[in-house]
Image (cartoon, rainbow, N blue to C red):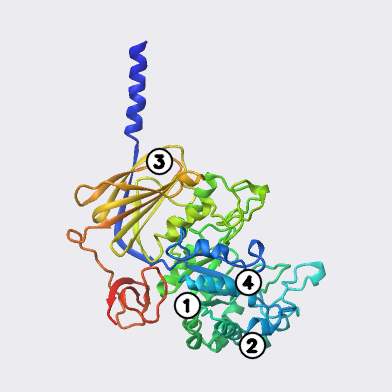
Amino acid sequence: MRKLLLTLISLVVATAIHAQAITVVVRDVRYQTVTGFGAAACDGAMCPYGSDTGPVRLLYGPSSKVGLNIMRMEISPNFKGDINASDIGWDTPYDWHGSLPSAKEAKKRGALVFGTPWSPPGDYKTNGTAQGGNSDSQGNKRGELRKDCYEKFFPWLNTFLEYMNKNGVQVDAVSIQNEPDWWVDYSGCLYTPQQQLDLVKGYADKLDKEKYGVRLISAEPLGFDPSYSNKLLTDPIAREHIDIIAGHLYGHPPLGNMKSAAVLAAKYGKEVWMTEHSVTDYASRLPNWHEQLLFAEELNECMLAGCTGYIYWYMRAHWAFVGTGEAKYGVENKKNRLLPRAYVMSHFAKHVTGSTRLGTTSSMATGTESAFENSAYIKGDSLIVMAIDTTKTSYNLRLRLPYKVKSGTHLLSTSNSIEDLCQEIPIEIDEPVSDITVSMPARSLNTYIFMIDNESSAIRNVESDDEDGPKTYYDLQGRLTEQPHGLCIEKSANGSTRKVFISR
């Protein structure tokens, strides 16, 4: 009996040592360059309306623990009410002052900031109010932009840009509309894809892009309905005005509608931003670790779908990145303290921002509903592999890389406990290799960061098919720059990217 027990123990140990293996092949095929990750400083727990800058200070900038670099704010249609114009420092009839503190703080940390209208001013609309109209008290009248006010819309956005500029914030982009396909009883405005096309095609030249250095984002449909962006991109006049296509993920996973929309966007060299999703707003508790891994999978699937920018909903909520201080959601929900979801986001925000996605294939099925997901990226001399395992089984991960690497770090998150989030573990490499096996614990989020051995690896830059076309430049953090210098990412008109060095 004793001999049998020893044999069984030996088998258990051997099984633990020789964990099941998954092979991931990383290919030197380049896809989108990732601009970055962010969140919204809007209503709700950020009240009063974005003026509490604590979450921004915690979440933004390369020296923060999270590394966000995109901030969304509302372009309010509401009149300023009790706010005194002399207190603001710039006379405007609209209530835009609340966005300023957070926007200023984000810009100080190198972030891109963009504004989204929930509605144009009520006197521009068919129902005469900024509200969507979907309630008895609002007459159940659908609120749309009146055709005789199409010519007023972009000049109204110019007044917002002028106001922000006068108060020290250069806005990087403005959107046409939040959720144009969702009839609401709060601030909202409905557009069909054809109405959006008519607005952009006929009047977007009134947006002072050059004066304010601003890009135009398409309307942001609720479920990333591709008919909105496709209608714009297939029209040559409208296409010239649109810089970024956008949408939300409610009811539609990333590898569905967004991936479909990204195909045409990539063809015309347009960025693809997911501009709002809260995954699940847990009504009475903090998310458990499995739910955090599902959030990581959504981030990963957005990258696989061709996304260049991912913007979460609120910065501060018990189901978001920064705690609210409400004890009913758990003792860990301390006000202005980072929550586990922030550390999950940091795997992507701190390391994938500014990178170019590479192709991968795996010996285990990946994608929506899969227990294992992966993606890979190149950024400068770094090769980054993401791997997410939602099962109770640990694996060895065999990585077959397109070039040799000489050192590496494993960033590992395995639970909601702070000590189990973003652990840094060195990867021992004796000599440059392109085939390496690393550990992947059960129920884990993993970022493997390798340093490429340039002496033994030929890193190919993808050449543009249209060398004479317009080019845009980004720094290595993925931020658009009008005056590129040093090592930059060059993006050609056809969407291809390469690293270039530009001297002053």
Q: Is residue 127 above or below residue 449?
A: below
- Residue 392 position, x and y percent, is 46, 37
- Amino acid at circle 4: Pro
Where disc 2 sits, the SS reads helix
Where disc 1 sits, the SS reads loop
Earlier sequence position, callout 1 versus callout 2: 2
Residue at x-position 35% and y-position 79%: 484
Q: Which residue is mark 2?
A: 152
Earlier sequence position, callout 3 versus callout 4: 4
Q: Which residue is mark 4?
A: 180
Circle number at residue 441? 3
Mark toward the viewer: 3 or 2: 3
- Closer to us: 25 or 1: 1
**Quarter of the image containing the C terminus?**
bottom left
Distance Cα–Cα, label 4 vs label 1:
18 Å
In the image, 116: left or right of 407? right
Distance Cα–Cα, label 1 vs label 3:
41 Å
Q: Which residue is mark 1?
A: 243
Residue at x-position 35% and y-position 76%: 492
